[in-house]
Amino acid sequence: LSMASDYFFPNLGGVESHIYILAQKLIKRGHRVIIITHDYGNRCGIRHLPAGLKVYHIPLGTLPFSSSAATLPNLFCCLPLIRTILIRERIEIFHAHQAMSSLGLESVMHAKTLHVGIRTVFTDHSLFGLGGGGWGEVTGNKIVKGILSDIEAVICVSHTGKENLVLRALLNPDLVYVIPNAIVADSFKPDSGKPLYKGVTIVCVSRLAYRKGIDLLIAAIPKVCAAHPEVQFLIGGDGPKMIELEQMKEKHQSVISPNQVELLGPIRSDQVRDLLVRGEIFLNTSLTEAFGMTILEAACAGLFVVSTNVGGIPEVLPDGLIEFAQPEVEDLVRAIDRAIDIICSGKHDPIKVHERVKGMYSWADVAIRTEKVYGDAMEIEPCPLVERLRRFIYFLCYFCQRLYQSELN
């Protein structure tokens, strides 16, 4: 089988880790897996990773003036390369990841075009609006709808994500499966030898962007520091909101001591655990989130979680391990106050929380459930060429109609 996405190592992120670990688990279960992604600098051509995982880095340009790993839409430009790889590797199942990956979506179309019995599966890792956010959302949703009109199975990482994708792409809900992310629990063990401190440390690891609710964080920190002088914030990550965080520290020097808010900058994946165990509370302020891997990692490391109640986050952890807040400043401050009280009262045991989370999420279970999806996809008869053309023409006409209407408006 083949997996394809713009997002893969050496780029770091949740989608990248998901693809790599799932591929490794499927190889251990006896499958032959390859990965197709774009080139990263000098990393071009074929690379071999542990356990016999073969990675094809094909030469495609990424979006200019952007830190995103997504490639420019190429349509048929990469068809010869994709065709050669799929035929050479004798691929039976093609599994694309992430709706905003041009390479993944286009490769699904190319795999179906070969018409050699390749079954296609798609995993969506994010939530997107239904068109109210502008032309970009409308265009993206229509492209996803057109590509997924001829697919055997779709996987979402949460039930909220499933509802979102079914509405965006007008999919048959029976073809959409929910398989949550998992975690390598042994990589996020709490620090059992951690000394006791008088204060409470709140950790936030996130891309510093609007979508991650950094504006909420900027407004909440001065209020929390004024009410709890003993609290310290550790903020890891980089992004366009970094400057505003630095300005917030300078503006509120009267209530924020010099070392009370520490901006750590970019954090490598192998540094996340060491940062998490420095704190007692993990703070997530996302405005939209399909699953929230950092929440799961923080809970596994023994932290009590405070998060905005959005997207698929309520599905991640049970009651008692997380305190929810509405995406409003005052309610977020209330939730942080509640979490501080829980930590100070000694009701939160990091070791017990780690063992509880460890038993809830397993990559081995994710691989078994994904295998079941592959089996169901293989049992579906390929769609006749005439029906595929009918679906594509309907999508193309509808897309052109919306484009024409937007130009008139």
Image (cartoon, helix red, strand yellow):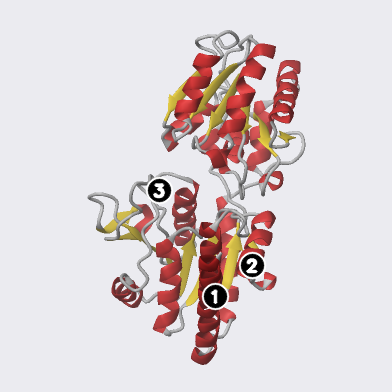
Point out the frontmost of discs 2 and 1: 1
Q: Is residue 370 above or below residue 256?
A: below
Q: Nearer the viewer, mark 2 or mark 3?
A: 3
Where 186 sits versus 387, above or below? above
Q: Position of residue 350 (x, y in %)?
A: 65, 27
Residue, x 62% and y 47% (percent of image)?
Answer: 361
Tell me, for residue 68, which label it has, or none: 3
Identify the residue under disc 2. 176
Q: Is residue 117 left or right of residue 78?
A: right
The label number, if any, that marks residue 186 in the structure image: none
Left or right of 247 in this view: 310:
right
Q: Which quadrant of the rendered structure holds the N terminus?
A: bottom left
Q: Earlier in the sequence, mark 2 or mark 1?
A: 2
Q: Quadrant of residue 113?
A: bottom left
Which amino acid lies under the numbered mark 2 shown in the image of this protein? Val
Percent of width and height locating residue 322 = 71, 34
Quadrant occupied by the C terminus: bottom right
Pointer 1 or 3: first along the chain: 3
- Residue visible at 43% across and 85% down in the picture: 115
Q: Which residue is mark 1?
A: 401
Q: Secondary structure at mark 1?
A: helix
In space, the residues marked 2 and 3 are separated at their CA atoms by 27 Å
Residue at 22 percent across and 50 percent down: it is 42
Neighbor class of circle 3 (other Cα within 10 Å; few <14, some 14-19, many 20+) is: few
Q: Position of residue 348 (x, y in %)?
A: 72, 25
